[in-house]
Image (cartoon, helix red, strand yellow):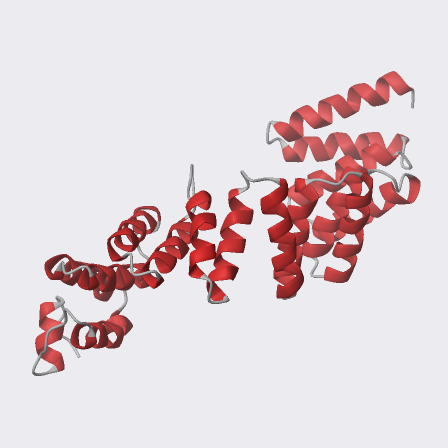
Amino acid sequence: MGVPKLQNQMRRIVADFNAGRHEQARSLCGEALREAADDPALNHLMAAVLFAKGEILQARAHIQASLAIRADNASAQLLAGRLERAARDFDQALFHLARAAELAPGAAVLIEQGRTLDEAGDRAHALEVWRQLTLADPFSAEAAARLGRMLFEDGMPADAAPLLERAVKGSAPASAWFDLALVRQDLHDHVGAAAAYRKALEIRPDDAEAAVNLGVALQEAGDMDAAIEAYRTAYGQRATTFGTIAMALTSAPHGKLWIDRETLKGLLGKNKN
């Protein structure tokens, strides 16, 4: 295949892929590969298209074909790492990501390494990678959220708080707001915790755990009426939250006492056992 023709085909494939026309991009890739099966860029493109379609096994074959011809391509090594992670081969994923880091160090590789180590359950190394990424890219909300969560789990809420505050700037997922609320609650900022739980519930209204925790935060802040409303929401979504709600209502400094379970269930809006 002539170079100008091949380049034109690749431009069309990229345009279709970027426009979301993955099946058309795949078809064009297949046509081009029939004439240039050993072209590393075409194999790389086909791997990316197949990955987007969830066809991991075939995508791995094409990225390996690409790397067999041109192993010093950082973006191909990065894609290979992502594909191996998707296939749950974490050792191979980390091998390719380490090679990508040698060729083109940067935040993109660190993110993939952190995600891979998280999925592999290698918490110690994941913690270090997320820490590196927060230094390399202070604007990475994902890195701030992951590191903040891990520091909170390690009993360091004061260190976690500024990271999670950073993580919720912009369009943050409910999980980041939930983690920030937990940290604020641990630091006895109950009003701030309630505000963060409310943000989490705006994004994920069916999160019964967030609704229970909102009730606890409001109760600790002395707003009993609002706390009861939050508990009603949680109980209405998931009846199994009753035990947690009952314990919170009767044990917190601002709690109340009920004669029996049915009275409390009635208050929460359900009268069934």
Q: Quadrant of residue 52?
A: top right
Q: Check the picture and name the quadrant holding the N terminus.
A: top right
Residue 265, percent across and down?
13, 73
| Residue 242 placement, left or right of 111 | left
123 up-or-down from 64: above or below:
below
Residue 253, percent across and down?
17, 71
Look at the image and tell me whether residue 271 can be seen: no
Residue shown at 53%/38% (left/top)?
A: 139
Q: Check the picture and name the quadrant holding the C terminus.
A: bottom left
> Which residue appears farthest toward the front when viewing the image?
158
| Residue 18 placement, left or right of 60 | left
Residue 237, percent across and down?
26, 62
Q: Nearer the viewer, residue 168 or 49?
A: 168
| Residue 158 placement, left or right of 256 | right
51 up-or-down from 194: above or below:
above
> Which residue appears farthest toward the bottom when viewing the image?
260
173 up-or-down from 156: above or below:
above
Residue shown at 26%/64% (left/top)?
A: 212
Q: Quadrant of residue 34?
A: top right
Residue 160, percent across and down?
46, 55
Residue shown at 38%/55% (left/top)?
A: 178
Q: Nearer the viewer, residue 212 or 43?
A: 212
Look at the image and tell me whether residue 3 can be seen: yes
Q: How many marks?
A: 0
Q: Nearer the viewer, residue 209 or 105?
A: 105
| Residue 75 placement, left or right of 240 | right
